[in-house]
Amino acid sequence: MKVRGQKEVHWDRERVRALRTHLGMTQQEMAGQLGTRQQTISEWETGLYRPRGTSNTLLNIVAERSSFKYQVRRVKKA
């Protein structure tokens, strides 16, 4: 999903935690809103797993609607 003209956002642990903090939610609250388990949010935030599929899309929608500012990392080419 593209957000406001940006490339598709790939959610890493820092972005997931930053979004949750931006929303003022606990892991349990965010899990309830996304229809997932608190453990899943924890796994995303520790980098054990990354959101994919529907979860990735939901995070993009929540981020856009909450005016969350994405920081797109640029990869330097060698």
Image (cartoon, rainbow, N blue to C red):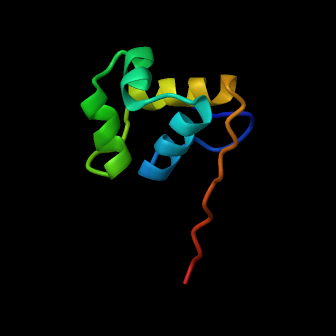
Name the image quarter holding the N terminus.
top right
Closest to the observer: 23 or 55? 23
Is residue 50 depicted above or below 32 in this figure? Answer: below
Rendering quarter of residue 74: bottom right
Q: Position of residue 17 (x, y in %)?
A: 48, 43
* Up/down of 30 relative to 21, above or below: above
* Residue 24 location (% of width, % of height): 57, 30
| Residue 10 visible somewhere in the drawing | no
Front-most of residues 56 and 7? 56
Q: Position of residue 75 (x, y in %)?
A: 57, 68
The residue drawn where x is 32% and y is 21% is 36
Rendered view: 48 above or below 26: below
Furthest toward the bottom, the residue is 78
Q: Is residue 52 left or right of residue 58?
A: left
Is residue 8 visible in the rendered image? The answer is yes
Q: Is residue 66 above or below residue 45?
A: above
- Counting labels gives 0
Question: Is 50 in front, or is 68?
Answer: 68
Left/right placement of residue 4 relative to residue 32 reads right
User: In front: 54, or 40?
Assistant: 40
Residue at the image position 57 percent from the left and 41 percent from the top: 8
The quadrant in which the C terminus is found is bottom right
* Residue 32 % position (x, y): 38, 16
Quarter of the rendering containing residue 44: top left
What residue appears at the point 67 percent right and 26 percent down from the top-left corner?
66
